[in-house]
Image: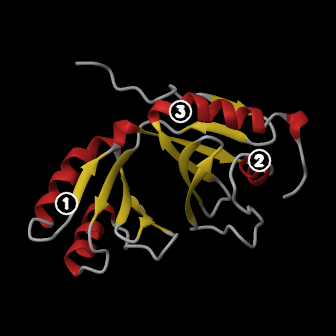
Amino acid sequence: MSDLVSALAGARYAGLATIEEAGLQGMITLRGDLSSKTLQKAVKAATGAEVPQTRRISTSDSGAVAWMSPDELLLLVPYDEVEEKTAAMAEALSGEHALAVNVSDARAIFTLSGAGAREVLGKVCPVDFDASAVKAGDFRRTRMAQVAAAFWLDEAETFHIVCFRSVADYVFNLLKTSAHPQSRVGVY
């Protein structure tokens, strides 16, 4: 059996902000009726968190749930528990029109922290990163230059960025270029 490795083996860069590949993260894509009590109960059992409101993320000590679209959630659970939780989710939703898929190895996750984090993302995403526009608990799907990405902001003013694993190197280098100390714009 192969050793488990994350997309970029913990790559890190410090400039206007600090970019770090976050390592292995269990991720489950869940499609279904988000208003279903059965689905909400299964989500709570898997993550300890509630189904979030539109464009938000709900967190708990054991996981998180991000709103992806009107019928889709992204569940974040410990990597070593994702297979078990995906199977439990599928069983709990067996009578529902729903789909739960482990997408952990198809995704990469980065953290972006520091005083320049909003500016770094603002240069590569078509999003207003002003503090009044993006607050802790907000979750957003967007483009990051030429690729799809999603991000949320936590209470510690750290951004968490999810992208496809196949473009992880591109995203890391894009963020690194945007965070270069000589590229300061000073908008945020």
Nearer the viewer's eye, disc 3 or disc 1?
A: 3
Q: Are marks 1 and 2 in contact (CB under 8 Å)?
A: no
Residue for badge 3: 168
Q: CA distance from mark 3 to mark 1?
A: 28 Å
Amino acid residing under circle 3: Ala
Residue for badge 2: 123
Amino acid residing under circle 2: Lys
Query: How many numbered circles does the render carry?
Result: 3
Q: Residue furthest front?
A: 146
The quarter of the image holding the N terminus is top left
Return the disc, 1 or 2, that comes first in the chain's sequence: 1
Is there any visible trace of residue 62 in the rendered image? no
Q: Residues within 10 Å of mark 2 (few under 14, many from 20)?
A: many
118 relative to 23, above or below: below
Residue for badge 1: 89
Q: Which mark is residue 53?
A: none
